Amino acid sequence: MSFKRPNFFIIGAQKSGTTALCEYLCTHPNICISRLKEPHYFSDEFNGIYSIDTLEKYLGLFDHCRKNIAVIGEASTGYLQSQMAVENIYDYNPDSRIIVMLRNPLDLVVSLHSHLVFHGHEDEYRFDKAWKLQEPRKHGFCLPRDPRFYYTLQYANVMRIGSQLKRVFSIFPKSQVEVIIFDDFIKKPSDIYNQALSFLGVSSDNRTEFPKVNPARSLRFISLICLARRVMPWKLRKVFKDSIGRKLVRLLMVRKALPLVLSADVESEMLQIAKEEVEILSDLLNRDFGRWLNCPRV
């Protein structure tokens, strides 16, 4: 069987607008996106996120792409964190185009934690405590029941966007990498969208509407919900989550994300990492991101 092969990849970072950009791109008449967002096929060390474990299964995600479509891609935000994914993508297709979306690492990690709690991949709803659990979690302790996203619980690693982009540039030529800053995307989504189209080599489709996608949310009664998650087997939780549970959560338990207050010691640790990464990123992109260090947290 002949399969269409992807030639562009949105590789992260998490909570930096990748879902929105992916949804905008997938409606373009000359672009085709994989059936499954975040297949993570090339991130070998993140096993078990989805059951896409063979090239045939992976390429099957693109079997709906029409024959005349030349721009075919997928979005897996874990690729940026992965030590193996970008090199694997290069080995698969060295002519691939890579889109990297980046955000203030302090905001990114806080938003990611809230997202993981909301969707049941993190069962410690207090960010300060989740941050302090990183070391024991490296050794298999205090882990949530959902085994698929353990790599995202190493929040300090998630913040290292400068180092991760540096690795991307060491593998792919800069001419094949488009870096999008979340702040720019939020302010002028039309400009950034058309910039992405130009990078991918397709003409504008004159899109004028850019609705907000995947807004930040939190759960009511979160302490009780997280307590239940710690004792409920993952398979049972998954059945509940995929059926009436999802509707119940949406109807009764969803609210806007709450503001966060960080303890002084955790904020200090986060700022130290952010300073290092902002310096690397500023140097790589020849742009000053120092303002990020003084912004209020989400």
Image: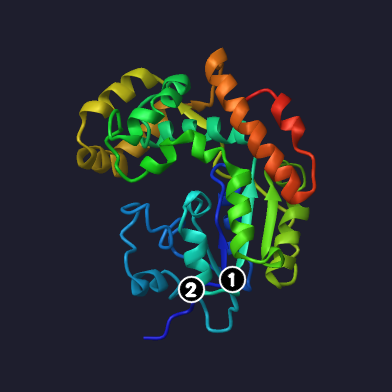
Q: Identify residue type, mark 1.
A: Ser
Q: What is the x, y in percent for residue 250?
A: 42, 34
- The residue carrying mark 1 is 96
Residue 267: name its quadrant: top right
* Total residue callouts: 2
Give the alpha-carbon distance from disc 2 to disc 1, as whole Å: 9 Å
Q: Secondary structure at mark 2?
A: helix
Q: What is the x, y in percent for residue 82?
A: 47, 52
Going 46% across and 57% down the picture, which residue do you hit? 37
Q: What is the x, y in percent for residue 248?
A: 35, 33
Up-down relation of residue 155 to residue 213 (above or below): above
> Are discs 2 and 1 less than 8 Å apart at CB?
yes
Up-down relation of residue 66 to residue 186 (above or below): below
Up-down relation of residue 267 to residue 96 (above or below): above
Give left or right: position of 153 versus 210: left
Q: Residues within 10 Å of mark 1 (few under 14, many from 20)?
A: some
Going 29% across and 28% down the picture, which residue do you hit? 142
Give left or right: position of 19 versus 135: right
- The residue carrying mark 2 is 92
Most foreground residue, 173 or 18: 173
**On-image quarter of the C terminus:** top right
Going 66% across and 62% down the picture, which residue do you hit? 177
Query: Residue 180 bears which disc, if any?
Result: none
Most foreground residue, 123 or 167: 167
Residue 273: name its quadrant: top right
Q: How is the image coloured?
A: rainbow
Q: Identify residue type, mark 2.
A: Tyr
Residue 298 seen in the figure: no
Up-down relation of residue 260 to residue 95 (above or below): above
Q: Secondary structure at mark 1?
A: loop
Q: What is the x, y in percent for residue 20?
A: 60, 50
